[in-house]
Image: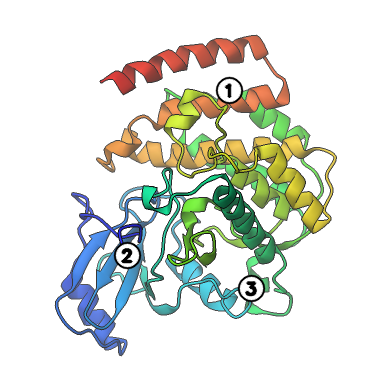
């Protein structure tokens, strides 16, 4: 079926030592029949993800990228254990196969899990699905409900509880992402001076604590090929933790591109939230708060934090490209997106609107030049 998500050719410089991996897998007791087909998924911009298809088993391998990386990022053992410990309470997770922490195998930690066959809703839904407004709305609600379901997981008294660091999650996040941006800053991106100051001055008390995904997007879920509005899998758990659910929602909304957004955001859209039938960002918040019973007097904080956090993630990736630690051309214009995020954050908090509008025009023209090439 053509709508099923499959990998593509392995990118230059990101080849996998498959013989070393196979030797290790067999040593873990995994039976491998037939000649392997190795492909690589292009969706992720952080960890590298490969599909290893054998006659008898279909596997996914996750490993960190080469080059400089944040101290706490790309922790394969943590990502593996989060999923292994969460699956009894949240069964839309891949089955873990094995974790390798012996860097002599391929030069880094990695883990292997079983592949869930399905549809991943990326920027453009497959035309074969023929989604109308009703189906888009149903998909939107189901994805949000799956996030709400995650936030209800009874983690207390389980191994998942160790992920948390206690009260003060919001403050730790603002301080931590602030420091990460300083370390990854390059001369062609904004300082976020006013945004960072505003975030520090508006940190709320934690609304509550729960298991949060921390990278919730449509292209991190897998849909049932027979019922393509149904979520059957959730991927990319590297940043999952115990934290404030409203921070999780704010981070998710940073990726939520609406049909009325600027061309810069539309050009970088990675999920189908622009379709008729999808909620607006405001409707997402209203739906979530009504269904969970949570309340907030300053939603703007969570939305601005989500945008700043996304800017840091993009900048950490762009930093690798800027310093020639990766030649992936998909990252070369991330600096423009970071400027656009900066403008949107400024507008949300009402600072320097004239300056923000002037910047928006400037970078819109720059984007047009790039797209015309």
Which residue does the numbered mark 1 point to in the structure image? 343
Please give the label number shown on residue 160.
3
Residues under numbered marks 1 and 3 in contact, where contact means CB atoms less than 8 Å apart:
no
Q: Residue 210: x and y, percent?
A: 71, 63
Q: Residue furthest bottom?
A: 29
Residues under numbered marks 2 and 1 in contact, where contact means CB atoms less than 8 Å apart:
no
Q: Is residue 182 above or below residue 129?
A: above
Q: Is residue 222 above or below residue 300?
A: below
Residues under numbered marks 3 and 2 in contact, where contact means CB atoms less than 8 Å apart:
no
Q: Is residue 309 left or right of residue 3?
A: right
Q: Earlier in the sequence, mark 3 or mark 2?
A: 2
Please give the label number shown on residue 143.
none
Task: Judge the density around disc 3: few (<14), some (14-19), many (≥20) Cα neighbours within 10 Å.
Answer: many
Element type where label 1 sits in the image = helix
Q: CA distance from mark 3 to mark 2?
A: 25 Å
Q: Residue 281: x and y, percent?
A: 66, 39
Element type where label 2 sits in the image = loop
Q: Is residue 27 above or below residue 89?
A: below
Q: Residue at x 60, y 80 (%)?
A: 88
Q: Is residue 61 left or right of residue 285?
A: left
Which residue does the numbered mark 2 point to in the structure image? 108
Image quarter in which the N terminus is found = bottom left
Q: Residue 265: x and y, percent?
A: 49, 30
Q: Residue at x 29, y 66 (%)?
A: 51
Q: CA distance from mark 2 to mark 1?
A: 38 Å
Q: Residue furthest left?
A: 35
Image quarter in which the C terminus is found = top left
Task: Tell me if I can see residue 218 in this picture.
Answer: yes
Task: Judge the density around disc 2: few (<14), some (14-19), many (≥20) Cα neighbours within 10 Å.
Answer: some
């Amino acid at each position: 079926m053509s709508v099923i998500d499959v990998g593509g050719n392995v990118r230059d410089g990101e080849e996998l030592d498959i013989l070393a991996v196979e030797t290790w897998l067999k040593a873990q007791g995994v039976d491998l029949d037939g000649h392997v087909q190795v492909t690589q998924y292009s969706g992720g911009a952080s960890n590298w993800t490969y599909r290893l298809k054998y006659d008898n088993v279909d596997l996914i391998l996750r490993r960190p990228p080469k080059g400089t990386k944040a101290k706490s990022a790309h922790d394969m053992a943590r990502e593996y254990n989060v999923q292994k410990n969460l699956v009894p309470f949240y069964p839309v997770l891949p089955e873990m196969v094995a974790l390798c922490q012996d860097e002599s195998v391929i030069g880094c930690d990695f883990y292997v899990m079983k592949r869930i066959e399905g549809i991943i809703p990326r920027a453009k839904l497959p035309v074969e699905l023929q989604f109308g407004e009703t189906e888009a709305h149903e998909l939107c609600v189901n994805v949000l409900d799956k996030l709400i379901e995650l936030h209800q997981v009874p983690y207390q008294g389980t191994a998942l509880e160790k992920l948390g660091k206690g009260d003060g999650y919001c403050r730790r996040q603002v301080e931590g992402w602030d420091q990460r941006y300083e370390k990854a800053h390059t001369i062609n991106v904004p300082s976020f001076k006013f945004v960072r100051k505003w975030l520090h001055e508006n940190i709320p008390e934690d609304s509550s604590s729960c298991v949060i995904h921390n990278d919730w997007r449509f292209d991190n879920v897998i849909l049932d090929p027979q019922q393509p509005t149904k979520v059957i899998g959730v991927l990319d758990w590297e940043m999952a933790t115990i934290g404030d659910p409203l921070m999780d929602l704010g981070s998710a909304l940073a990726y939520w591109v609406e049909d009325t957004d600027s061309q810069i955001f539309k050009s970088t859209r990675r999920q189908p939230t622009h379709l008729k039938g999808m909620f607006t960002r405001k409707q997402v918040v209203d739906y979530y708060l009504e269904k969970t019973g949570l309340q907030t007097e300053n939603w703007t904080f969570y939305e601005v934090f989500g945008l700043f956090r996304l800017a840091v993630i993009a900048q950490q990736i762009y930093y690798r490209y800027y310093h020639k630690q990766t030649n992936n051309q998909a990252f070369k214009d991330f600096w423009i997106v970071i400027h656009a995020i900066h403008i949107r954050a400024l507008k949300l908090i009402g600072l320097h609107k004239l300056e923000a509008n002037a910047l928006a025009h400037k970078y819109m023209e720059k984007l047009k030049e790039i797209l015309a090439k």
